[in-house]
Image (cartoon, grey):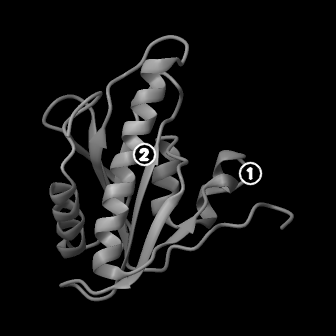
Amino acid sequence: MKATGTPFDVGQAVAAVDALLAEPLPASGPTQWEPSKEEGWSGSYGAGFRLKLLWESRFYFGVPGPEWDAAQAEADEYLTALTRALEERWGPHRVVSMRAFLMGEVDDESVLPLFAELRAFDLYGELMVWGPVASPRGPRWAAVSLSQCDEDAPHMMVAGVTDVPIEEVDEPGD
């Protein structure tokens, strides 16, 4: 499939999630970026997690309109296709909201490093989470998300894997 961004293939996206599940997770240390073959970011890894860019739309400049709406619909379609493929394998997913981070009231020191890295890129889309799931390295939690840091930025679909449960962070006062 291709319309507004890089080509998306659900089989390749599932294979990328499988590859994340098979990789070792650092026990500690600072978060490191994995550069892409072009310019930019293709993923990160840090204490107990790995994060990978699965798909990216193109940039949009100016006021949202029909072209932006088409890109959003396409991105949602891709996320739905990947979510269904992973549900066939692991069963229903849970939704973990990033709302507490979007409000800017959560301290990065008190959350999973995976959340801190998503926040570093302004990726606040809901996480579709499965786990624990079997992996060659033991039980893991897997998540996929679709985000856009602002209306001119590309839509980014990412996958994350951790060795600890991915739980929603409560907003202060909850």
Within 10 Å of disc 1 (Cα), the crowding (few <14, some 14-19, many 20+) is few
Within 10 Å of disc 2 (Cα), the crowding (few <14, some 14-19, many 20+) is some
Q: Count the marks: how many?
A: 2
- Relative to 120, say whether 79 is above or below: below
Could you tell me which residue is drawn at 29 percent across and 27 percent down? 4
Frontmost residue, 108 versus 9 = 9
Q: Amino acid at mark 2?
A: Asp
Could you tell me which residue is drawn at 22 percent across and 55 percent down? 10
Q: Pointer 1: what residue?
A: 105
User: Which residue is situated farthest in the right direction here?
Assistant: 173
Could you tell me which residue is drawn at 57 percent across and 74 percent down? 167
Q: Amino acid at mark 1?
A: Glu
Could you tell me which residue is drawn at 81 percent across and 61 percent down? 172
Is residue 128 shown left or right of residue 15? right
Q: Position of residue 163 (x, y in %)?
A: 38, 79
Q: Quadrant of residue 97?
A: bottom right
Residue 49 is at least partly visible in this image? no
Residue 162 is at least partly visible in this image? yes
* Mark 1 residue element: loop
Is residue 96 shown left or right of residue 68? right
State which tag comes first along the sequence, 2 or 1: 2
- Relative to 121, say whether 9 is above or below: below
Is residue 86 shown left or right of residue 24? right
Q: Pointer 2: what residue?
A: 76
* Mark 2 residue element: helix
Q: Quadrant of residue 154?
A: top left
User: Which quadrant, please, contains the N terminus?
Assistant: top left
Q: Position of residue 113 (x, y in %)?
A: 47, 62
